[in-house]
Image (cartoon, helix red, strand yellow):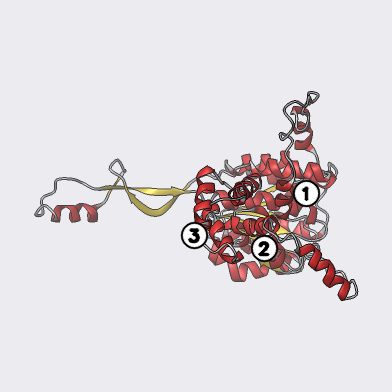
């Protein structure tokens, strides 16, 4: 292969690497060999060859396609588009929604700061962002009061959190030579191989695994800012552990468990936006819980499931049927944790009808308004709930 094509392939691979794709030197060589086996004039064949050699995960395909369309575009396409616009009366096309990963590709096209002339002297730069004091301030800052840059830093901190849950014993048994249970069936099967002589006693043990986690998150107008940031935490949890079910509710209930399984956060959140039509709308907590109890509870609430209910408790229907559905939800799970951002206020009192109807049926009542409260939630889920924490709230209600 001669000409500038190998160099262009090398720069394209570096672009993908800056955008977050794991592309190495071996992948670049494989891409050059693949290009030599296809027709250069066929753009579809070239794109398929590069995708096959440079993409190793399904979640990176959308990012690759967007980068390919920008990097290997026709230089005369812009002039042709301008000419066609002039013929059509200079009508501007309607704005198109940016595909997933567009921001990352745009940042990858920028010239990195390290690419400077070797003889050019630059003054020393002191990186002062996200120092210890900034991190401490970010931990206690309310999500609703954060700027765009602070929200981006908070999302990066949230993605580093892990959610431990105490492993519980199940009914399943697993072969274990040092297990405490004697497996008679396995012992007899082994004896049949040696003519019925018992030479070894098979043993087994109970399988322990973390319980399922179910999240019910309110996305009404009063909760939308918190829900947007908490989605990053839920996406990290869904990709870190199995048996995680996530539901969003406003005026209706939406199951986004499958959407959050996408590895790339931008792809996952774009799929969520298409699946949830009632973002920042009203709140019907009672109807949403009734639908969950009727359709989903038997599917996802099993083996000691833990439920996280994220809402401020302000119901548009005046708590109609809320107490009955909360009672059924509480009886269907082993632990029900209510996360309410209104608890950030020192003078908070459970006076609304929705909060008074929900409080008697929860095991924990916690705030969720900043990174510190989120870390406190992570720590509390790794230990048993204390019933004393709910006494003062139930007495106040």
Mark whose residue sits in front, 3 or 1: 3
Q: Where is residue 128 in the image (x, y as percent from the top left)?
A: 78, 28
> Compared to 190, does 258 lie above or below?
below
Real-space CA distance between mark 3 and mark 1, rounded to the nearest whole angstrom: 59 Å
Camera-side residue: 375 or 168? 375
Is residue 56 visible to us here? no
Q: Position of residue 95 (x, y in %)?
A: 82, 66
Q: Position of residue 176 (x, y in %)?
A: 31, 45
Q: Mark 2 points at which residue?
A: 271
Please tell me whether mark 1 sits on a helix, a strand or a loop: helix
Q: Position of residue 341 (x, y in %)?
A: 78, 49
Real-space CA distance between mark 2 and mark 3, rounded to the nearest whole angstrom: 36 Å
Asked whether, in this view, residue 163 is left or right of residue 187, the answer is right
Q: Which residue lies furthest to the front in this view?
A: 2
- Which of pointers 1 and 2 lies earlier in the amino acid sequence? 2
- Which of pointers 2 and 3 lies earlier in the amino acid sequence? 3
What residue is at 57 percent from the left and 41 percent from the top?
Answer: 382
Q: Mark 3 points at which residue?
A: 37
What label does residue 341 carry, if any? 1
Mark whose residue sits in front, 2 or 3: 3
Q: Do the residues labelled 1 and 2 touch (CB within 8 Å)?
A: no
Q: Do the residues labelled 3 and 1 touch (CB within 8 Å)?
A: no
Please tell me whether mark 3 sits on a helix, a strand or a loop: loop
Q: Which residue lies furthest to the right in this view?
A: 89
């Amino acid at each position: 292969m001669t000409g500038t094509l190998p160099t262009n392939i090398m720069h394209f691979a570096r672009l993908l690497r800056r955008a977050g794709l794991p592309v190495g030197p071996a992948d670049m060589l494989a891409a050059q060999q693949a290009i030599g086996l296809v027709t250069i004039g066929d753009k579809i064949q070239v794109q398929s060859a590069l995708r096959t050699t440079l993409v190793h995960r399904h979640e990176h395909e959308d990012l690759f396609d967007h980068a390919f369309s920008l990097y290997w575009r026709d230089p005369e396409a812009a002039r042709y588009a301008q000419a066609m616009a002039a013929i059509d009366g200079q009508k501007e096309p309607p704005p198109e929604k940016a595909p997933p990963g567009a921001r990352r590709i745009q940042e990858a096209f920028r010239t990195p700061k390290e690419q400077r002339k070797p003889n050019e002297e630059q003054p020393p730069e002191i990186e002062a962002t996200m120092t210890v004091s900034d991190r401490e301030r970010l931990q206690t800052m309310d999500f609703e009061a954060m700027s765009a840059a602070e929200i981006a830093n908070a999302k990066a901190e949230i993605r580093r959190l892990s959610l431990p849950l105490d492993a519980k014993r199940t009914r399943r048994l697993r072969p274990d030579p040092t297990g405490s249970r004697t497996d008679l069936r396995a012992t007899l099967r082994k004896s049949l191989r040696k003519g019925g002589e018992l030479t070894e006693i098979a043993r087994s043990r109970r399988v322990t695994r973390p319980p399922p986690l179910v999240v019910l998150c309110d996305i009404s107008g009063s909760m939308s800012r918190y829900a947007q940031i908490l989605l990053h935490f839920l996406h990290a949890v869904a990709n870190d552990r199995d048996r995680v079910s996530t539901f969003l509710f406003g005026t209706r209930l939406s199951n986004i468990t499958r959407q959050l399984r996408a590895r790339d956060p931008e792809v996952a959140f774009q799929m969520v936006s298409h699946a949830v039509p009632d973002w920042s709308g009203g709140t019907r907590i009672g109807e949403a819980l009734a639908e969950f109890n009727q359709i989903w509870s038997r599917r996802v609430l099993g083996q000691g499931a833990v439920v996280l209910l994220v809402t401020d408790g302000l119901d548009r229907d005046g708590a109609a049927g809320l107490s009955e559905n909360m009672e059924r939800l509480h009886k269907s799970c082993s632990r029900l944790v209510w996360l309410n951002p209104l608890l950030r206020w020192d003078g908070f009192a459970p006076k609304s009808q929705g909060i008074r109807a929900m409080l008697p049926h929860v095991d924990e009542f916690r705030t969720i308004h900043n990174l510190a409260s989120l870390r406190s939630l992570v720590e509390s889920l790794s230990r048993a709930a204390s019933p004393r924490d709910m006494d003062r709230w139930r007495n106040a209600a």
